[in-house]
Structures are given as structure tokens and as C-alpha cells.
Image (spheres, rainbow, N blue to C red):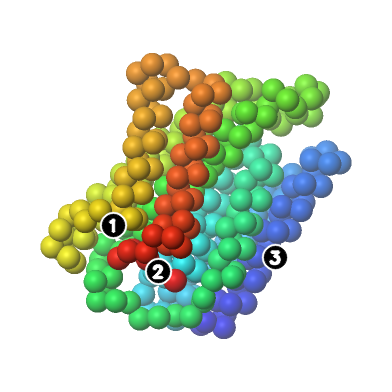
Amino acid sequence: MLKAESTLFYLVLGCYFLAMAIHFVFLAIRKEKLSKLALLVQLVGLILHTAAIVCRGIAAGRLPLTNQYEFATSFAWGLCLVSLIFARRFKFPVLGAFVAPLICLIIGYAAFQNREVRDLMSTLRSNWLGFHVSTAIISYGSFGVSAVVSAIFLFRGRMRDDHFWGQHIPPREKLDAISYRSVCLGLLFLTFTILSGAIWAEQAWGSYWSWDPKETWSLITWIIYAIYLHLRLGRGWRGKSAAIFAVVGFVAVLFTYVGVNTLLPGVHSYR
């Protein structure tokens, strides 16, 4: 199974990078068929990615969500899934062209991690593992989509106002709404992540909260996005300020994942 997972992983790498290349060619020569082809290749990559995760889980005899490699590849999977859903839901297929580089960056990061299958520590052997980490994956994927859409919003005014961009990039009001919905989804799942983690921690270590670096930065990230929603709903924040806030929030997400594991070791550190 590990051999199958390894083969599938490299096929996934190829699909995602090919999808990104086709997206870029589409933006360059503006042939509509290329946009559909890029999304199809991205969807094939997602299907193969799902198969790779399943194969690793079978080989490991557990959910493959417990080390840097496994979470990174799952992070890329979640981002790809959420981006495809939003592209379809909001009739925004060109979103894939802007999300693809981020997917490739994360899956590329996964490729450089240690892929050895290790036994779980006793404290990780819990039914909460799947729920806790799965909600984090969807949360991070949603925040990633929000950050990309917010970046598009910030550069939308600088794009040439021609028929192509007008047809494929929604107006700024719609971009703002898409980013807001993605933040709402991400914050909901991050709330589930923190709550399930607290319950799990109490069962494993006898304490709901220990101010471990990962816990602390997850809370900081939650607070950032909670402030975003408060300012938006309570004070009518829209536009540029909200977009910048969403991008900053995703920087906190990336630090919670990569920075904490690299610079601030704790009970949540994994390699």
C-alpha cells in the first residue's frame, strides 16, 4: 500500500502542477476550453489525492494525519477541495488559477518531509483524532481560499478593465462576499477544531488547556478571524480593510502550522 501511495502522490504532484500550468496558459492566451481542462485536471488530482491518503491510512493502520508530511498533503487536499467547491458554487472557475500556486506550494512542501510511517504515541490513540484534524484541514483550506480571493480583490482595481477580466473575475462586491463566506466556513471548523482538541487534551493529559504553542496560536488565529467577523457584522467593515484582514489571518494560519512546528516545539510538534 505504501508503494501505491508513493506512486499516487507523485501523480498528484504532476496533476496539480499541470493544472497550474494550464491555468496560466489560459490566462495568457484566453481560450475558454483551457479553463475547463485545468479544472478537470485539478479534479482528477483531487481524486488521486484522496486515493493516496486512503492507501496511506490502510498501510499505517490509522488515520494518516499525525506528522508534517501527512498534515501537509491533507492541507493541500483540503485547499483543493474547498477551492473547487467555491469555484462551482459562485461560478468562478478562474479561481483555480489563483489557488493552484498555493496548492502546489503546500504539496511541494509535503514532498520534502519525512514520509516514514510511524506508530502513534499512546496519547494520540483516540477517536477524537479524526474529527480534530479533519476539521483543521477544512478550516485551513477555507482560510486559504479566503486569502486568495481577498488578494484578487486587492488587485482587482489594478487589472485592465477589459472584456476578459470583466467576464472571469467577479466585481469587487462579489469577491468581498465570497471571502466573507469562506472566512465563516473556516471559523466554524476552527471552532470545532479547538473544542475537540480541548476535550481530547482533558482525556489525554487531564487538562482542557495547557497553553502549548500550537494551542496558543490556534487561539490567536481564531481571535483574528473572530475580530474580522465582529467588525464586519457590527461595524459594517467591507472592501479593502476586510481583505487585508483576511490575508493577515491566513499568515497566522501558516505560522500556526509551519512556524510553530519549526520554531516553537511543544506537545503538538510532529516531524
Q: Earlier in the sequence, mark 3 or mark 1?
A: 3
Q: Of 159 and 211, which appears nearest the observer? A: 211
What residue is at 67 percent from the left and 29 percent from the top?
Answer: 155
Real-space Cα separation, disc 3 to disc 1, in angstroms: 37 Å
Disc 1 crowd rating (10 Å Cα; few below 14, some 14-19, many 20+) is: some
Q: Residue furthest left?
A: 206
Real-space Cα separation, disc 1 to disc 2, in angstroms: 13 Å
Frontmost of labels 3 and 1 is 1
Q: Do callouts 3 and 2 mark residues in contact (Cβ within 8 Å)?
A: no
Q: Is residue 169 visible?
A: yes
What residue is at 21 percent from the left and 56 percent from the top?
Answer: 210
Describe residue 214's horizontal placement relative to residue 9 as left or right. left
Disc 2 crowd rating (10 Å Cα; few below 14, some 14-19, many 20+) is: few
Circle 3 sits on which residue?
14
Q: Is residue 43 visible?
A: no
Amino acid under label 1? Asp
